[in-house]
Image (cartoon, rainbow, N blue to C red):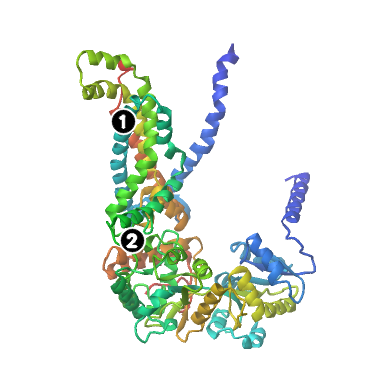
Amino acid sequence: MTRPGLRGLSAALLGATLLLAPPRAHAEDMVFVSTQMRPIEEAQKVRDTILKDAPAPVAYVTEDPPALPVRVKAEMQGGKHTISLIGALHGELQPLATMGALMTLDDLAARLKERGIPDEVMKLGQFGTGHQMYIPWMQATYLMVANRQALPYLPAGADINALTYDQLQAWAAAIQEKTGKRMLGFPAGPKGLMHRFFEGFLYPSYTGGVVVPFRSDDAEKMWTAFAGLWKTVNPNSTSYNFMQEPLLAGDVWIGFDHVARVLDALRQKPDDFVAFPAPAGPKGRGYMPVLAGLAVAKGAPDANGAMALIDYLAKPETQITTARAVGFFPVVKATLPPDLDPGLKLAVAAIAATGGAKDALPSLLPIGLGQKGGEFDKVFMDTFQLVVLRGQKPRAVLDRQGQEMQRILTETGAPCWAPDPPSQGACQVK
Amino acid sequence: MRNTRLAPYLLIAPSLLFLAVLFLVPLVQTVALAFQADGPGGAAWSTANFARMAGDLNFADAIINTFEIVVIVVPLQLCLALGMAMMLRHVQRGRDIVLWIWSIPLGISDLAAGLVWLAILTDQGYLNTVLNWLGVVKGPQSWLSYETPIALLAAIVVAEAWRATAIVLVILVAGVQLVPKEYGEAADVFGATPWQRFTKIMLPLLKPSIQTALILRTVLAFEMFAIVLSLGGRNFPVLVSEAFTWQYANQNFGVAAAYAVVVMVISLAATLVYLLALRTPPEQR
């Protein structure tokens, strides 16, 4: 390239950088990069509401999830650090920890212990290293929501906050017997999140894992049991994408979905619905936390400021402000203000009950699959379709789908994630 | 002199360029994508995408469902449109208004049409409300679930017929208007029955219009998507909805492209069949 060309290019790049620079980001402000709350309205809420009382001025910058490791790596290699605080999902922080780009936060974790972050959740922030790599920031998860009309049919002695899958089946069967209708619903439509139910709830609850025991005997029993449960499920479930709609319409009385996809029902009719944790199986109460954490970059220009900001963001008041503003829920023990939207209150209580359950078994979003995530989800949905909807015997289906799953894991080289035991190299289906 | 000979080509050049850039290039890319798969040394030519497509649990269903719809809907629409076009010939006053009302569905998008029928056929929809009021059913009755495949098929057929008969009708009405009245009057003089006039005069003269309508309708029917997706969702896979699922949900662009190639080959084959079967000999043109 000729010199004028080069100069032109650098001028263009400079111009682009200036244009793309976030508003009000002064050079001296601490930079907080986040892969969450990226849409402009949400980011603005973070700046105007959540960070309003921050201990020091913060430049809140958003970054697309795939771009985060690229940027962090570039700063590491270039030796010129701008990022102090990183906010991202558990699965997005893990590669950064592996890269050695995060500071250990053991002291801070000890100091924040009194905030009441559940131990299992705090421990996720160690990635099995024994050192705290990030502090849990905020969470979302999946819940069960039931219409109050369904409550009289609960099996005797069942505690709605500690249901088992057998009790759920008995409950739905009792409703079916009395009303003649199948009132249990799942979001198994084309845009529903049913695959997360298998990956984060059913599999861990029955097998204690997701990938490793995919075709185990426990898994075979699980699918047989789930096919039994499905007899009480509304057949329109294969069209449901957001459970708040059939719940509000009264088509189903009991539903499972991501909190963001039932929140409308809870907000519109808080007196008609109850929210509670998903059921437990023989191996525990599998649940999928959608957990975002806060990490400090190694070589951060303002590590102390970043830690002070983590402290601030983990305060109960800030956590409640966050829940109000963006619909992500507290990880710390937070006393809810009396004027909190009653629907939000239901969701917060159910999420707290899920994470705080004695038999809680957190199961993470798949990690390290990249673009193959969709095909990984398809393995579960295909198994569901073949075993539950088409009535095939689970053994043969699991053997075939297990091969498919292994192919995806081998191609991506993704190591196992919790609750499967950590693996060297690609996770292996037993 | 030379300029005038070049002029037509210059004038059609932009449209040719437009089609080449926005149609041929993506077409070639799609076909290339379908026949490539990631190997150890990067992308390589292979039929792996087609193997995965054919081995998928929904592939057979998608083929069967797609052909089922085409085989039922296209003849049904042709008969309906022929009948409507014939009736329209005898309408003197308000002909335009009738035609206008009949072609309303043409102005509605596939997805909107699908949602309209979903509102009618869903559990708490208008159909159940009416049936409940008439005492035919008690409480909500499912029509669109995987447990009621026949009702689901019927619903999709009705919705497709409602939405796309108008396009056939419009083409046939144009064709009917070109048929001179004298032929019918001459046949009348020789004592032909109305049915004879229809089959011996009207149908043969309409053949070019029927051919156009059938090609257009069949190709579109093989590509139907939004109505099926909104009514059937996961319960009624068709070829295009599977292509969509592989592209967006499964994020495997190779298999999605393989589906696209299959749809294209089927459409081309159908067009060829119509061109040959409904050929009008040159002396009749």
Q: Residue at x 57, y 23 (%)?
A: B11
Q: Residue at x 25, y 24 (%)?
A: B198
User: Considering depth in this image, is B44 or A265 the residue closer to the camera?
Assistant: A265
Are the numbered discs 2 and 1 placed on the same chain, yes or no? Answer: yes
Q: Which mark sits nearer the N-terminus, 2 or 1?
A: 1
The Cα atoms of the two marked residues, 2 and 1, are separated by 37 Å
Q: Quadrant of residue B280?
A: top left
Q: Secondary structure at mark 2?
A: loop
Q: Secondary structure at mark 1?
A: helix
Locate residue A67 relative to residue A347 in the image: left or right. right
Q: Which residue is mark 2?
A: B140
* Residue A199 coordinates in the image, percent (x, y): 43, 71
Q: Please tell me whether residue B158 is drawn above or below residue A344 in the rendered image.
A: above
Q: Which chain does tag 1 point to?
A: B
Q: Which residue is mark 1?
A: B82
Three-letter amino acid code at the position of disc 2: Pro
Locate residue B175 relative to residue B11 in the image: left or right. left
